[in-house]
Amino acid sequence: MIIMALDHVRDLIHVNSVTQRPTDLTTTTPILFFTRWITYLCAPIFVFLAGTSVYLSFKSKANPSESRKFLLKRGLWLVILEFTIINFALFFDAGFHTLIFEVISAIGFGFIILSLLIRSSLKTICIIGLIILFFHGLLSMVPTTQGSTTNTILSLLFSPGAFPISSNRAFLMAYPPIPWLGIMLVGFAAGKLFELSMDKRKKIFFRIGLGSLLLFTILRFINIYGDPLPWSPQKNLVFSFLSFMNISKYPPSLLFCLVTLGIMFLILDFAERENRFTPIVSVYGKVPLFYFVLHFYIIHLLLLIILSLQGIPWTEMAFATGTFGRPNGIKSGLPLWAIYLIWISIVTLLYIPCKRYWKYKTDHHYWWLRYL
């Protein structure tokens, strides 16, 4: 939750975010590259632990049909939320010229499918998830006719892309749902690990984490399968390492999943140990959707203030172009050092609201609080 805010501050406010990809090795710097790369951890961990939370929430429920019904409604609600409140927070475009399917709707889609699979055995769900995770990259080898119905459906489910809705509106598939579903299903099956004693699960988390990172390293060195973007030697050792770590998030490749989820398991092992950080950072994780929506609106409002201070009038701000209000051809935004300061400030600012909202949720039991 904390790292995610860094990516969104950078994406909206960094001076070069509209014109420069931080993972483009021809234009990036190591600090900019890893400012983006560290945030790769966020989405797969969100989706994985969303699946785990479903297992832990419903494993003891006496009425499976009620659990299925709630999960289905929760999934539909997240998809609706994505295309309304969150899409508006991202673009501030009242005309909704761009509808984007991102992580919240990917989780919603996963909940919907999981509601249909909830009565299947844990082993079956785990196998389906692992098959998707390890082999969805092979789909690019399936021959389809460009523009055909089959090609369009497969693209929507497995690949990122833009699809015109009308002459001035488009649908962007940023998080193709099937690859992310694989991560959620594996996360659901991993919920069984959380029922083990602390010592046992710490050992398992550590071993899975190291094993995943080792498999990532081996497959990446082989450079044949696991990611559509092969690595190659660069101008120096540092940039060769950047190339090695430059993996594909859209859609999440096998190597992307191995390295990010491997790190996640090591973090879970660390979080089980006595430390002073866990009680603090867990405040944000207790109210993830509240934090997610609120931080987006704060970042975007701050961007508009910065644009105004940089002399850009409201009439020149572009909200229908997908640039968050930043006009094309006019330099705007802040350097990377300022992005880090803003990020830390926003996370600090949201600590008290998140803590108070969590207390409100624990003290009240209104039905609608389960959806927020």
Image (spheres, rainbow, N blue to C red):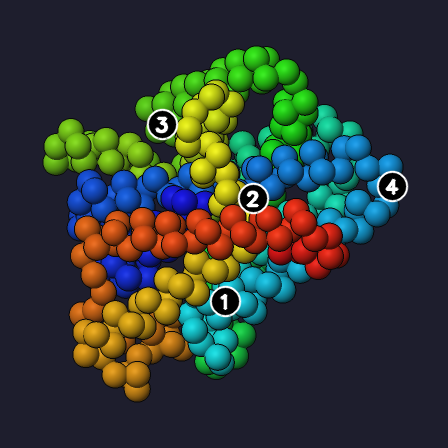
- Residue sitting nearer the eye, 193 or 223: 193
Q: Residue at x 49, y 45 (%)?
A: 284
Helix, strand or loop at mark 3: helix
Q: Looking at the image, tell me whether mark 3 or mark 2 is earlier in sequence order.
A: 3
The quadrant holding residue 342 is: bottom left
Q: Position of residue 109 (x, y in %)?
A: 64, 52
Local crowd at mark 4 within 10 Å, few (<14), some, or many (≥20)?
few
Q: Residue at x 48, y 20 (%)?
A: 273
124 lies above or below 308: above
The quadrant holding residue 286 is: top right
Q: Real-space Cα distance between discs 4 and 1?
A: 35 Å
**Residue type at numbered disc 2:** Lys
> Label 3, on which residue?
220
> Label 1, on which residue?
87
The quarter of the picture where the N terminus appears is top left
**Residue type at numbered disc 3:** Arg
Circle nearer the viewer, 4 or 3: 4
Left/right of residue 104 with respect to residue 367 in the rendered view:
left
Left/right of residue 353 with respect to residue 199 in the rendered view:
left
